[in-house]
Amino acid sequence: MGFVRYAEIFTCLMALALKQETVVQAYPSGAGIQACSTLVPLHGVDPQTTASPYQLEVQGTTYLPGSLVV
C-alpha cells in the first residue's frame, strides 16, 4: 500500500477513536414526576453542600411579563 492509503486508514481510525457519543434525554413538559416530588434534578451529581460563591442583587420588587430584568 502507498502512503495515501495509509493516510486514509489513519484518518478513519482517528475519526473512530475520537468519536464521542452523548446520550441526552429531553422531555417536552420538563423533568419527570420523580424529580418534581423531591426537587432533586437527578443529574447524577451530588448537591452542593457549601455556600454559593455568587450573590443575587435585585433592584425591583415586582416583575411583569415583558419587563426587563437587569
Image (cartoon, rainbow, N blue to C red):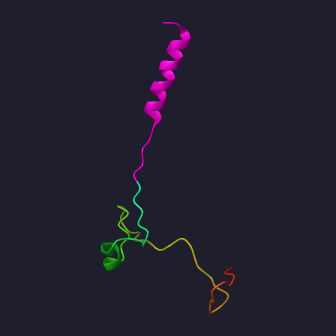
Q: Residue furthest bottom?
A: 61
Residue 9 colored in magenta in the image: yes
Residue 62 colored in magenta in the image: no
Query: Residue 26 lies in what quarter of the image?
Result: bottom left
Query: Residue 57 lies in what quarter of the image?
Result: bottom right
18, 29: nearer the viewer = 29
48, 70: nearer the viewer = 70
57, 26: nearer the viewer = 26
Q: Residue furthest top?
A: 1
In the image, residue 55 sits, relative to residue 10, either above or below, namely below
Q: In the shown orientation, is residue 24 left or right of residue 65?
A: left
Residue at image point 66% right, 90% down? 60
Q: Residue 6, percent across and down?
A: 50, 14
Q: Residue 65, percent across and down?
A: 63, 86
Look at the image and give the residue range highlighted in magenta: 1-23
27, 19: nearer the viewer = 27
Q: Residue furthest front?
A: 28
Q: In the shown orientation, is residue 55 left or right of residue 48?
A: right
Q: Residue 31, percent across and down?
A: 38, 71
Residue at image point 35% right, 66% down? 42
Q: Residue 16, percent across and down?
A: 44, 31
Query: Residue 17 lies in what quarter of the image?
Result: top left
* Most common SS among magenta residues: helix
In the image, residue 52 sits, relative to residue 4, either above or below, namely below
Residue at image point 35% right, 61% down? 44
Q: In the shown orientation, is residue 31 left or right of residue 53?
A: left
Residue at image point 47% right, 35% down? 18
Q: Quadrant of the C terminus?
A: bottom right
Q: How many badges with numbers are in the image?
A: 0
